[in-house]
Image (spheres, rainbow, N blue to C red):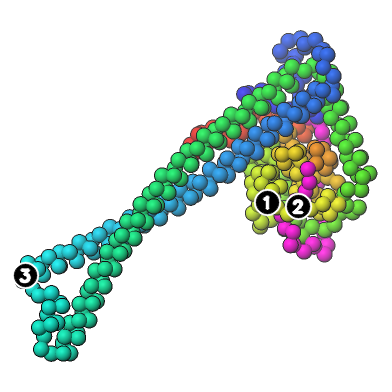
């Protein structure tokens, strides 16, 4: 896929050249602009859902690879211990055999024939010690044998699971690519008038949703200070404004939605789940009217999109294919709720929001420039897994 995927905010400008080069535009369709926008947004949502599925498979595969390495290391140690115990058991067997061949008496018989009671007791202790040593070697040999067998079985199962996860990751990648191609085909089929209408309709829908949310009183009346970690996460996210959205990316050159939020909090010193679904499932939920900068705002019924709250009813987000990290109204997508990565943190006594770069909230072609599919995760890196 080599054509560029672009957001509706700049479709009229950026795709005009593509449409002209392709020949006369198709006749205007009967489908209303509102229905076109709904269909396009549905495709974007499905693409992002597939992206988060890919991200989850990636996280699971990395964890499985780490477990496989741990099991392989443990198996190596168990086999070394088993070899050592086998060598010890062999030496003891040779000693016992050589003693029998030399006509020597057993320690117990020597103890009975001894005329010295003290020597007899010493012989008895030596016999008991030798017996315990041999029993210990046999017990350790059996324990190490069982441990090596169990670890070998676990390593085989880990390898099978790793291969299954790799197949799931490949399927998720294929799903994402297919969803993005659907978006590309739809955009390439639109006339300049339809593209302009989509951009205007989307801006109007977002503005209306934002007004309704602000008027409802569901957001904080004023921006409260974040914690030190929240401030650090916010400053990291602010520094990424302008970088392109690339599915599966978590920086430093590009991000998808949860790649941006997870990395922001990672740089703030707190590790959070990689995907938007896991962030929604595992982090502490907070009411919208208690939002503070650094909190994560989650969107859509399946929690397939996430952004970082900056205050004043706005978020920083990596919006979708073709867009760049930007500042958006919090109601730019259908809200599901909000979560807080550091619920036990104390708010700062003083807070000065980081300055936003010029054009951070722009909706034009300078903001959404699109990207080629080749900018996604390298095929070679994925196939290697």
The residue at 88%/37% (across/down) is 209
Q: Quadrant of residue 347?
A: bottom right
Residue at the spot x=24%, y=69% of the render?
A: 134
Q: Is residue 345 magenta?
A: yes
The local secondary structure at tag 1 comes to helix
- Residue, disc 2: 285
Residue 205 in the image, given as x and y percentages of width and height:
87, 32
From where the camera sits, is residue 80 visible?
no
Within 10 Å of the Cα at label 3, are there few (<14), some (14-19), or many (20+) other Cα atoms?
few
Give the residue number, with chain letter if any, for mark 3: 102
Q: Residue at x 13, y 90 (%)?
A: 116
Q: For residue 246, what is the image quadrant?
A: top right
Q: Which residues are magenta?
A: 336-365
Q: Are the residues flagged by discs 1 and 2 in contact, CB closer than 8 Å?
A: no
- Asked whether 302 or 9 is in front, the reply is 302
Q: Which residue is mark 1?
A: 282
Q: Is residue 197 magenta?
A: no
The image quarter containing residue 215 is top right
Q: Front-most of 13 and 290?
A: 290
Residue 153: % across, % down: 39, 48
| Element marked by disc 2 | strand
Outermost residue on the front side: it is 112
Name the residue at 14% across, 67% down.
96
Q: CA distance from mark 1 to mark 2?
A: 9 Å
């Amino acid at each position: 896929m080599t054509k560029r995927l672009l957001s509706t905010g700049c479709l009229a400008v950026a795709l005009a050249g593509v449409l002209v080069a392709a020949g006369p535009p198709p006749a205007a369709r009967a489908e209303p602009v509102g229905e076109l926008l709904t269909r396009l947004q549905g495709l974007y949502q499905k693409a992002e859902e597939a992206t988060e599925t890919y991200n989850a498979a990636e996280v699971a595969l990395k964890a499985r690879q780490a477990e496989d390495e741990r099991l392989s290391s443990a198996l190596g140690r168990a086999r070394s211990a088993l070899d050592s115990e086998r060598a010890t058991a062999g030496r003891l067997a040779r000693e016992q055999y050589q003693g029998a061949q030399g006509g020597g008496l057993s320690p117990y018989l020597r103890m009975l024939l001894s005329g010295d009671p003290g020597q007899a007791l010493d012989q008895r202790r030596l016999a008991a010690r030798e017996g315990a040593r041999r029993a210990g070697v046999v017990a350790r040999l059996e324990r190490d044998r069982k441990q090596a067998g169990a670890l070998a079985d676990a390593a085989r199962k880990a390898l099978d699971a790793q291969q299954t996860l790799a197949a799931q990751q490949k399927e998720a990648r294929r799903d994402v690519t297919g969803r993005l191609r659907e978006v590309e085909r739809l955009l390439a089929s639109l006339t300049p008038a339809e593209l302009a209408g989509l951009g205007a309709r989307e801006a109007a829908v977002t503005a209306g949703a934002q007004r309704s949310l602000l008027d409802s009183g569901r957001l904080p009346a004023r921006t409260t200070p974040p914690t030190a970690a929240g401030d650090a996460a916010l400053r990291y996210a602010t520094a990424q404004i302008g970088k392109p959205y690339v599915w599966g990316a978590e920086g430093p050159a590009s991000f998808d939605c949860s790649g941006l939020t997870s990395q922001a909090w990672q740089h703030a010193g707190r590790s959070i789940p990689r995907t938007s679904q896991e962030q929604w499932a595992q982090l502490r939920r907070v009411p919208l009217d208690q939002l503070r900068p650094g909190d994560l705002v989650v969107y859509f019924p399946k929690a397939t999109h996430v952004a970082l709250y900056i205050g004043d009813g706005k978020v920083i987000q990596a919006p979708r294919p073709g867009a760049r990290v930007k500042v958006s109204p919090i109601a730019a997508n259908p809200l599901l709720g909000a979560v807080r990565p550091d619920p036990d943190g104390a708010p700062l006594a003083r807070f000065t929001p980081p300055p936003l770069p010029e054009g951070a909230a722009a909706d034009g072609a300078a903001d959404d420039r699109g990207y080629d599919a080749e900018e996604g995760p390298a095929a070679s890196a994925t196939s290697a897994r």
